[in-house]
Image (cartoon, grey):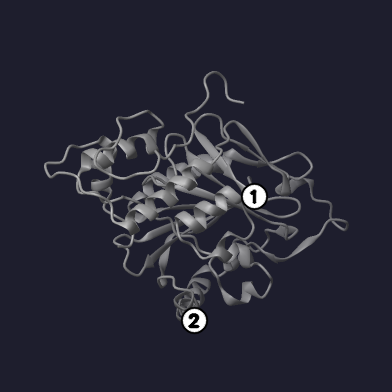
Amino acid sequence: MRFGAVACAFLACLVAGAAAADPPRQLTPQEKARLEKLQRIGASLHPQYGEVKVPVAGATLHLGKDYYYIAGAEARSVLVDAWENPPDTAMGVQGIVFPAGTNFMSNGWAAVISYEDSGFVDDKDARTADYGAMLKQAKDADEDDNAARKEKGYAPLHLVGWAQPPYYDQSHHTLVWARELAVDGAPEHTLNYDLRALGRRGVLSMNILAGMSQLDEVRSAAARLQNIGTFDRGARYQDYKAGSDKLAEYGVGGLVAAGIGVLAAKKLGLLALGLVFVKKFFAIILAGLAGAGAWFRRLFTGKRAEPAVATAIAADAPAPLPPPEGPAA
C-alpha cells in the first residue's frame, strides 16, 4: 500500500492514543520497511533552537523556543526520502523550520529554507508586474512539467491558482504569495506559501508547506516568519553598494515568475526558486489504534509512551527534542 495523505481526524485519533475495539494486526513487510525507514530518518535529525545562522545567505533565524531548524543533508532527507519529492527539488535547500512540538510526520506546516545568490533584486517593478499573466503561463506549463514527473515516477501536480496573490512589502523588502496545488490521488490540495526576503547579494526563501485547509493558520504563521529570518548587518538590502555589488538580472516580477515556474524565468537560471514542494501527511495504518497511538504520541511530542503492542517495530522513532529550559539561545 502507498503511505500518503490520510484524513487529519484519523491522525488525531492516533496522536490521542484512542483505543480500538479490533485487535491489532502484524505489519506487512512493505509497511514495516516503510515504517523502519521513517524511524531511521527521525533518529538521524538534530534540531536546532534559538539563534541559527544560515551562512550562505549571511542571515540569522531567530527561532527562540517556538520553532526549530533541521539543517543541510538532514533536511534534504526529509524532503526526498520521507516526503517523496523529486531529488532535484532539494538542490539549494539549506534547511527546514518546524513549529516546536511537531515533526516531519505531523499534520502541521513546515517551512523549507533556501537561498539564491542572484545579486541585488531591484524592486521598482513590484507594482507594475502582471501577476495574472504569469499565473496563466505557469498553468499552461503544467502538461510538460507533469510529463517529466510521470517519467520519474511521481504523481502529476496541477497549479489550481493563487491562494494569495503576490504582495510586496517595500518597507521590509519582503515578497509574499501563495499557490494552491492539486496532486493526483491526494485527498486534499497542497498549499505552497512563499516568503522572499531581499538582501544585498541575493534572496532568502521560505516556502511553507501545508494543506489548503490550513491556509488561515499558515497565513498567521507567515506573518511571524517574516520577522524570524533577517539578514545580518552588511548583507541587508539597504547595504547594497551600487556600481560595485552584483545586480540581479530580474526584478520583483521576475522573482515571482521564477517562484511559480514560468519558463521565461527558468531561462535566467533560477530553477531553485521555481520548484514546488509537496509535504506528505502520514498515518501508519495499523488495525489496532492502541498500538499505533503510543508510537505516534512519542513521535509527535517527545514524551515516553507505553510500548506498542502486537506490532513488529524494530525501534521507537525519536521525535525532535523539546524546547530547552531557560532563556532561548
Residue 37 vs 270, above or below: the answer is above
Residue 325 vs 110, above or below: the answer is above
Work out whether residue 4 can be spotted: no
In the current view of this chain or complex, which residue is farthest to the left? Answer: 21
Q: Which mark is residue 136?
A: none
According to the picture, the residue beneath numbered tag 1 turns out to be: 173
Ranked by sequence position, the earlier of labels 2 and 1 is 2
Direction from residue 327 to residue 16 in the image, left or right: left
Direction from residue 1 to residue 195 in the image, left or right: right
Direction from residue 245 to residue 265 in the image, left or right: left
Q: Of helix, strand and loop, which one carries label 2?
A: helix
Residue 228, quarter of picture: top right
Crowding at dot 1, Cα within 10 Å, few <14 / some 14-19 / many 20+, comes out as: some
In the current view of this chain or complex, which residue is farthest to the top? Answer: 326
Give amino acid for label 1. His
Residue 269 vs 173, above or below: the answer is below
Residue nearest the observer in this picture, 125 or 206: 206
Disc 2 to disc 1, how far (Cα)? Answer: 33 Å
Residue drawn at point x = 73 percent, y = 61 percent: 118
Q: Which mark is residue 144?
A: 2
